[in-house]
Image (spheres, grey):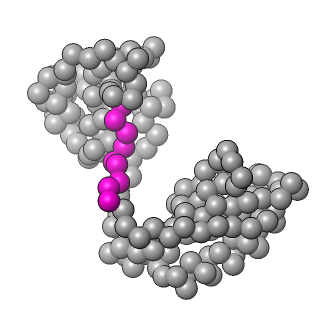
Amino acid sequence: MTVRASIFEHPELDALDVRLLEALQQNARSTFAELAALVGLKPPAVHDRVKRLEQRGYVQGYAARVDTRRLGLGLVAFVSAYTTAEVSYDAFHRAVAALPEVCEAHSVAGEESFVLKVITRSTGHLDDFLSRLKAVPGIARTKTTIVLSTPFERIGIALDRLLRP
């Protein structure tokens, strides 16, 4: 398969770079030969491009996706954290980062200050987590939404479609 024509424009990336980034998001364990076949280049050229993407910070790292349910961590929840006016955001960030149940923390616009994605074993574990979270200085209150199901979870982002002018 060769790179398709695209109206993609980016000041530092070309369509081949975008195709490589999309392929690496889908399978970071792809060999340079596999990536080369995908984009129509030779493996050494792909190697050079991938290394350049890493050095310039477009690839921030590689990780394995684990099945949290198989590990006994089947409850996913989004926790909105409402903070007080006196909150120290640096201290709050450190405290939240130290809670192992927190997978993501997002500073948001709106009534709440942060939305946290958390994974726990059970509602009892979630209750324990919420008690520890509410003890963090600067937390006024929380609101929790438990995920019942996840119809789909996107792996990576659709760069070629999102970065078109």
Q: Is residue 56 left or right of 150 when viewed as pictured? A: right
In the displayed structure, 39 sits above or below 80; it is: above
- Residue at the (83%, 59%) spot, across then down: 84
In the displayed structure, 139 sits above or below 73; it is: above
- Residue at the (88%, 56%) spot, across then down: 86
Quadrant in which residue 7 is drawn = top left
- Residue at the (20%, 33%) spot, across then down: 35
Q: Is residue 70 left or right of 128 when viewed as pictured? A: left
- Residue at the (76%, 51%) spot, across then down: 90
Span colored in magenta: 151-159
In the displayed structure, 38 sits above or below 97; it is: above
Quadrant in which residue 15 is drawn = top left
Labels in figure, total: 0
Q: Quadrant of the C terminus?
A: top left
The answer to whether residue 52 is magenta is no
Farthest residue to the bottom: give it: 124
Main SS, magenta region, reads loop
Evaluate whether residue 98 shows in this view. Answer: no
In terms of depth relative to the viewer, which is nearer, 164 or 57? 164
Q: Is residue 30 left or right of 153 when viewed as pictured? A: left
In terms of depth relative to the viewer, which is nearer, 107 or 10? 107
Image coords of residue 121 (percent x, y): 47, 79
In terms of depth relative to the viewer, which is nearer, 67 or 117? 117
Q: Quadrant of the N terminus?
A: top left
Image coords of residue 161 (percent x, y): 33, 28
Evaluate whether residue 46 shows in this view. Answer: yes
The answer to whether residue 154 is magenta is yes
Image coords of residue 29 (percent x, y): 26, 46
